[in-house]
Amino acid sequence: MSTVTVPLAPIRRWIGRRQSAHRERGATAGNIYFALLFVAIVGGMVHKQLAVVFWPSAPNASGLAAASLIPVLFGLLYLALRRFGPLALSRPAASWLLPAPVSRRRLLLPSLRLAAIVAAVVGALFGLAIVGHAAPRTLGGREVALLGTGAALIGIALLLVALAAQAGGRWGDRLDAVISLLLAAGLAGLVTDASATGSVAAGGWPSATTLLPLVGTLALVVGLLFAWSVRGLARTPNERILEAAKTAGTLFDSAFGVEPSFLTDMIERRYWARRHLRSVRFPARLPVLVTQDLLLVARRRRRLLWLALAAALPVLLAAAPAALVGIAILLGTLMAATTSAGNAKTDAGNPVLLRLLGLTSRQAVLQRMWVPGVLAALWSAASLGLLSALGDLPTGPWWALGLTLGPVGAVAAIRRARVGFVRNELLPLDTPMGTVSTGPLVNAAIGPDALLLGLPALVAIAQHHPLSWTSVVVQAVVGGVGARAYLAGTTATDRVELSSR
Amino acid sequence: MVDHPAVEVEDLHVSYGSTPVLVGVALTVPAGAGVCVTGENGIGKSTLLRCVSSLQQPDSGTIRVFGAAPGATPEFWRAVVTTVEPPTWYPGLTVHEHAELVCRAHGQDPEEAGIDEALDRLGLAGHGDAIPPSLSSGQKQRLTLACALLRPSSLLILDEPEQRLDPDGRKEVAALLAQYLEDGGSLLMASHDESFAAASGAAVTTMESLLPDPS
């Protein structure tokens, strides 16, 4: 067997030349021009909002909030890197170059470089935001620059850890769990901070002379780790790279077709492919589809845990206008209900199993609404109950108002699950900012639009008056009638398929 | 239902664009009998089955299933089972649970329906705890057939049920179909394997013989 390695650079150059032969002249320059123009216009439009996010006019975070933001932001970065690879190839390269006798290290190096740049930029932005919210404005430019550099280096370090986890064994999964815990702890810290009125962080920030050696050492360590990772690049197993290539390809498909379901479906498929299940017996008493939904929820306990933790998140908005809290509650209700709407989505996408089951569409949708409804009710009851207990809401039976949001969440989640693919044939809208395709916009609104049924609750929260039982009853009636109307309007007793033909 | 033939097709016309696929096709499947349509690729077997299953609208012609027009009604789908279209399996549900879900939806007791026995006969006994997407294509076909045969029905419409099955699997499926016919069910299928069709007790007929006499 010969071990001759074919040089990769000429192949890449040849591919590049062939690809550009099919492109119009100046197309690449045009794309770059439009991308820069887009960034400039959008940046010009939202620079004030960006300033609020990254560099408010005065520091406004307490020490606890700043310390909590670190695990939250960097934990998110790490988990995102793990989700997407972090080392990926384009699908054509994965098909044709991965099995070719080329240097594995050279093949993967450009991907690693790109991932490192992205991780560094995101890390630096996160670092800057934390410094911007917590550090006194007396902090000098050199200190800020050093802190930003340090954050960028931490971003790269996280990438390298994720890279090792991609190639490594089960410790990667355990590390993911630890990072998730840190993330949860960070969120808990933020909630605690929002419920108490912590004082804005003051001094105690290190000077440039302290920071310089620290950041220098960090740079040295990250540099060494990077070199070591590049050396070991060839050891990344094929199947992990193929998996990441599929992720990258699906991500591209999702972005290009404005169809997020490609990506979410893929993540879902991978999740179940890794699980080891044991068949259970269906209890005879419950309706069969309710049992199935319950089974699905019971098998994703970690999701339930996150959902329970997320019930505390509206507390973060305690200082914001009350209407915003109301909107957050409604969106959270939808999110909670969506946790168990996966089976409805399968039925809407392909009715073959529904035909095999032989239930009417009304029976099917009614049964599919139960578990999402109960989850939505419990979530909003917990969330509103917590807000009320912390004194962020006036007096009243807020937990009961939460319970009445169950049907609202169920209708919204099931409507969302039944939406199907984005209709990209809808007429595009010409605006002064450019052309906007309406298909994705219309698609994104289907589902959340049903949250309008929660308008009485939204008004009750936004008014910030003590809550009366009358408001609770009004919301219960509106939600119940809305759910019935949805069922009557979109299903039939003489049809099996969820969509009418 | 007993008075009518299971399937009656008269003068069926279907074309894709300017390409005619079915021209004046006529077919009868008597109740309690099995018919297997054979013919080369592209001759319109699947199109015929799709029309009979109400999954495709013909350009013209009449189709009756147990004396009534096929439709998307729950009554139709409680009487008819088809494997013309592949299913999308439910996420996070095992092979055994899929079978149980189908039985429960039809009010059957899973014990009496004989899920374990059916999975065993189709070689899926050791895969009860697997999720369907992890099965091989032949095993998925076996699971589809197991679900189709477990639930009560009066007419089976199967598109090449022997597809992707190994010789033992074909033998087992043919025996199950013969049993289904013996128990009073009706069967309409398309196949390329005449010995399989004969073993399942279905009368073999070619697509050409369903066309009107040119004279």
Image: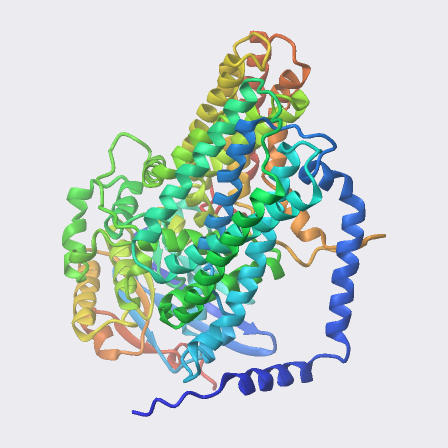
Q: Is residue A268 above or below residue A389?
A: below
Q: How many marks?
A: 0
**Residue A286 appears left or right of B16:** left
- Quadrant housing residue A143: top right
Residue that sits furthest to the right in the current view: A432
Residue that sits furthest to the front in the current view: A209
**Residue A61 appears left or right of B157:** right
| Position in image of residue B48 (x %, y %) | 43, 69
Residue at the spot 65% in from the left edge and 48% down from the top edge: A145
Residue at the spot 49% in from the left edge and 61% down from the top edge: A223
Residue at the spot 16% in from the left edge and 49% down from the top edge: B114
| Position in image of residue B142 (x %, y %) | 25, 62
| Position in image of residue A385 (x %, y %) | 49, 16
| Position in image of residue A81 (x %, y %) | 48, 54
Res A70 seen here? yes
Picture quarter with the N terminus of chain A: bottom left
Q: Is residue B120 above or below residue A136?
A: below
Q: Is residue A440 above or below residue A365?
A: below
For this rendering, which residue is in front, B112 or A441?
A441
For this rendering, which residue is in front, B47 or B112?
B112
